[in-house]
Amino acid sequence: MKNKIKSTEVRDSAMSDEAASVQKKSRRRPKQETKIKSASKGTQPSRRKRGAEKNAAVREAASAKAQPKQKPARVARNSSAAESPRGKLKVMFFGGVGEIGKNMTAIEYNDCIVVIDAGMAFPDNEINPGIDCVIPDYAYFNENRSKVKAVLLTHAHEDHLGGLPYFLKDVPVPVYGSAMSLAFLENKLKRNGFKEADCRIVDDGESVQIGPFKIEFVAVTHSVAGSLALAVGTPKGVIFFTGDFKIDHTPVDGRHMNLERIAEIGKKGVLLLMQDSTNVERPGYTMSESAVGKSLDNVFRDNANRRIIVATFASNIHRVQQIINVAIKYSRRVAFSGTSMQYMTEIARKLNALTLPPDRVVELDKISQIPDDRLCIIATGTQGEPESALTRMANDDFKKVVIGPDDTVILSASTIPGNERSIYKVINNLCKKGANVIYESLYEVHSSGHACREELKMMFALIRPRYFIPVHGEYRHLKKHAELAELMGIPHENILIPELGFRVEVSASGLKRLPDVKSGSVMLVGDTEAGETMMTDRRKLASEGVVIAVVNVQGEPSVDLMVKGLTLTEKFSEELKSAVMYKIAGGDFEDMTVEEADKSVRKTLTKLFYRNLRHCPLIVPVIIGL
């Protein structure tokens, strides 16, 4: 596949200080015009001319007094422009509010929609068995396809871009993002069979005009390189969308969050702020990514005679770089395990975002030739994903790496809510094999990519928005963030806690809830949507088992039962067969269609299961002879 990756041509045309000053003055007097030009320097108007001007001024004043008094144009406090008389500015939420993951937000003005991120979430396999991933329901965009003009990508995490291969198939629009984000997206699109996609690279500080929206991309620090916040200029005012961020003053790659520009945007006026809520419950500041390197150094030093396996997010290139640096310092060769780890590190190396001398890399097939104390394996699997490298190692399902007492395994990542059980299962299995397992609660081997309370407060102080809507978090996070906004001086009535499907009009007069849009979750098995009927059957299979009843009504009648996931006594099994045979003998099936016979068998067996076991497995009748 050859994706069309283009640099955007429109560059930032931010106003100069002088222009901003002029605009500020004009906002104070929106209706006034200068009637009389100042005289040239060194000249004075004649007495007759001054008298004529005075009389004209008196007549004009008298005329104005006779006219009905008009109200001045209303200017939104802290907004960058006067309220436009036409069009409604709407914000809609399709994911990432009231939940962790599958982030998706949209901004709409008249016939133009821009979508911010299109992520995915990993399902809880106990609740939704057999599901590969969950994406937002974007039926609204299908119904309004002509209005959708672009996707704005804040960064390259799966919970922000993982749904794009599905979205772009139905709504093929340009995607704007950093070089790193689009390189990750391009690879994902290739693996999903895309032949062409319109990906447009933007630089830090660059602006693009999309319909009525002027979008400025602002550099922020996060746990993946190339992360961006968005300042969206609209006819009603500026919407500032932080994306995922933390304020890291010592970033590994030297790319700092542009706090100076954020302060300038705040000074000019921001109508609405939407901000990451993930770490709002954590006090203080998020630890710098650079501090993780020191902790890793200590672990490598203390385990000098052991093989070291480090599991981290494949997209966290800064973390991978620090692991590589420490491994090289202690004379270790580096091997990569896991498909996503291999392709993401390759992308980062091509973009010069990852430095690794070729002679320090060893293929996974050849690690048996390297002494344990000279080897470091960087793997995927921090969340206990069933097919990940670390989970397979823990389950003795990975031939190339066999875990033993001479291994130290480091989980350099935080636990995503909902994955706790899977992660602890992996940790327990590793411990049973004798490995020394190190994770965040024991050592500082992970730093969050999300801002804590003091960083969030700093952003409120810099941006000074009129309105606030918290995003990216469960409801408890959003509520705590709303409380923090009030603490920072935003009136209660200017704050709205969103839920999936909310459509909110934003104007100088307030935040107005409009009728909801269609939203929700789409569960996928491969590329196929799993409907509610399929999910009901899957849950029943997982919890109560399945009984396949083969009913032959042709010739000599018979009933055979195949049972999976539960145990039946011989007596109860015969009772089930007899109940169906009784219906056959009574001629019940003679005038039935296959569908009617299927329903009859299911109803008969269901009653017996509930009467004897107080629950019922999934029953699948197979009717022969009708």
Image (cartoon, grey):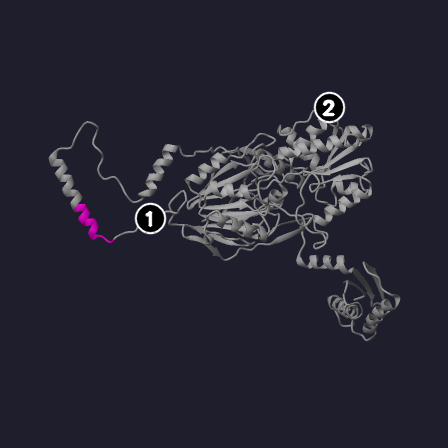
Q: Residue visible at 66% across and 46% down?
A: 416
Quarter of the image that includes the C terminus: bottom right
Identify residue for label 2.
359
Where disc 1 sits, the SS reads loop
Q: Judge whether residue 371 can be spotted in this image.
A: yes
Find out whether residue 62 is within the magenta segment.
Answer: yes
User: Gap between marks 2 and 1, in whole Å?
Assistant: 68 Å
- Check disc 2 and give the amino acid type: Asp
Quarter of the image that includes the N terminus: top right
Above or below, comparing residue 254 to residue 52 in the picture: above
Q: Which residues are magenta?
A: 59-68
What percent of the width, then of the height, locates residue 344?
A: 67, 35
What percent of the width, then of the height, locates residue 199?
A: 57, 37
What percent of the width, then of the height, locates residue 467?
A: 46, 49
**Residue 85 left/right relative to 607:** left
What percent of the width, then of the height, locates residue 584?
A: 82, 72
Structural crowding at the residue carrying mark 2, measured as other residues with C-alpha within 10 Å and reported as few (<14), some (14–19) or many (≥20): few
Identify residue for label 1.
73
- Check disc 1 and give the amino acid type: Ala
Q: Residue furthest left?
A: 48
Disc ID at residue 398: none
Q: Judge whether residue 145 can be spotted in this image.
A: no
